[in-house]
Image: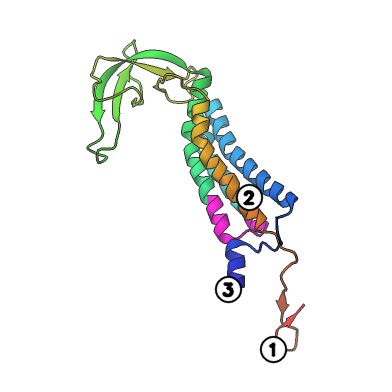
Amino acid sequence: MAYLRTSVWGPAEFVGRPPWWLVGEGLLAGVLGAGAIVGTTLFGAWTGRLSLADGEAGLVCAGALAVYLSFVGAGRALIGIAALLGVCLAVQAPQAAAGIVLAERGQVQSVVVTSVEDGRAAEGGHARYLCSVAGTDGVPLKVRIWRGCGEATRPGDALAVVSDPQGRVPPRGAQAGAGVAGPLRDLAPWAAALVAGCLVAVVRSYRLSRPAETAIPFGTGQAGHR
């Protein structure tokens, strides 16, 4: 049972509070991991690199963080929890990164609703209304808008849409008071949970001494300690 507890949750071979340097190492690993996941996605959205903007690079960063925790000897359950939190952060990051880009350099324009789709029937009553829109020049947008599109919206109505002048992120409905703080606030709980998971995993990986290894001497059939 002791071996099982050690392999699953980590040895945690210290008395009282964990060493300060171990806490610092755990915090650094979590902050760097969360920063790499969000940073690569934001960089991809800002520069238009789809391989980074769609979260694939963030998933690679989450996997690298799990490998690091395995290397330091963290418990398997804690490695799995940290990896799951990293994946969740990587999945949430693309939408937040697009919101940050639009908040920084987006331009608001007026569009005309061409059709309204009620998606609640297909999603069991929980989906949003989706509006197909076209610009003032009559060219339809490739994406449908849900912000500002509601039950009272009808074809011919005008909606405010914020779009990237460089075309690197898709447009979305404009929101009053929208800024960088909103997307970052959406990511904060996942990032904080990932940092906390890495902290616990690294702290519990502490081992006073290396575990005893066994070997079978030549010419005998009995196991002995090195």
Upstream in the sequence, badge 1 or badge 3? 3
Tag 3: amino acid: Met
Q: Nearer the viewer, mark 1 or mark 2?
A: 2
Residue at position x 56%, y 46% in the image: 194
Instruction: Residue 199: give its label.
Output: 2
Residue at position x 55%, y 31% in the image: 42
What is the quadrant of residue 157 in the picture?
A: top left
Measured from the top left, where is residue 3 in percent x and y? 61, 71
Measured from the top left, where is residue 166 in percent x and y? 50, 19
Spatial separation of the CA atoms under disc 1 and disc 3: 27 Å
Which residue is nearer to you in this view: 122 or 50? 122
172 sits left or right of 62 in the view: left
For label 3, the residue is 1
Upstream in the sequence, badge 1 or badge 2? 2
* SS type, badge 1: loop
For label 1, the residue is 221
Measured from the top left, where is residue 226 in percent x and y? 77, 77
Spatial separation of the CA atoms under disc 2 and disc 3: 24 Å
